[in-house]
């Protein structure tokens, strides 16, 4: 799954991407419902590893099934 797909699903679930401060290949995300945040790599067209996605979803306090269905 590419970063854009992950970002779309997180947005549907109510998460917000924080403003970028400078350049870099990672993006900060915040879940206002759980008051939790995480960092997700943005590798452009490359697929993110499943473990990386699952860890980020868990850190944001989102159920994995809810994320998959979004």
Image: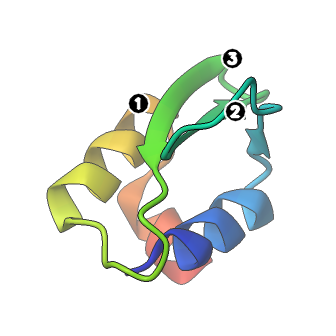
Secondary element type, mark 3: loop
- Mark earlier in primary sequence (1, 3): 3
Q: Give the residue drawn at x 65%, y 23%.
A: 34
Give the numbered dot on residue 59: 1
Residues 1 and 45: in front is: 45
State which quadrant residue 49 falls in. bottom left
Q: Which residue is mark 3?
A: 35
Give coordinates of residue 9: x percent, y percent.
64, 70
Give coordinates of residue 55: x percent, y percent.
28, 42
Task: Indicate the quadrant containing the C terminus: top left, top right, bottom left or bottom right.
Answer: bottom right
- Mark earlier in primary sequence (2, 1): 2
Q: CA distance from mark 2 to mark 1?
A: 9 Å
Residues 24 and 37: in front is: 24
CB contact under 8 Å: marks 2 and 1: no
Crowding around mark 1 (Cα neighbors within 10 Å: few <14, some 14 to 19, many 20+) is some
Q: CA distance from mark 1 to mark 3?
A: 10 Å
Residues 4 and 57: in front is: 4
CB contact under 8 Å: marks 1 and 3: no
CB contact under 8 Å: marks 2 and 3: yes
Give the numbered dot on residue 31: 2
Q: CA distance from mark 2 to mark 3?
A: 6 Å
């Amino acid at each position: 799954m590419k970063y854009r797909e992950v970002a779309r699903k997180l947005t549907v679930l109510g998460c917000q991407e924080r403003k970028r401060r400078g350049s870099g290949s990672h993006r900060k995300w915040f879940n206002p419902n759980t008051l939790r945040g995480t960092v997700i790599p943005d590798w452009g067209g490359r697929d993110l590893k499943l473990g990386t996605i699952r860890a980020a979803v868990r850190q944001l306090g989102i159920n994995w099934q809810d994320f998959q269905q979004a």
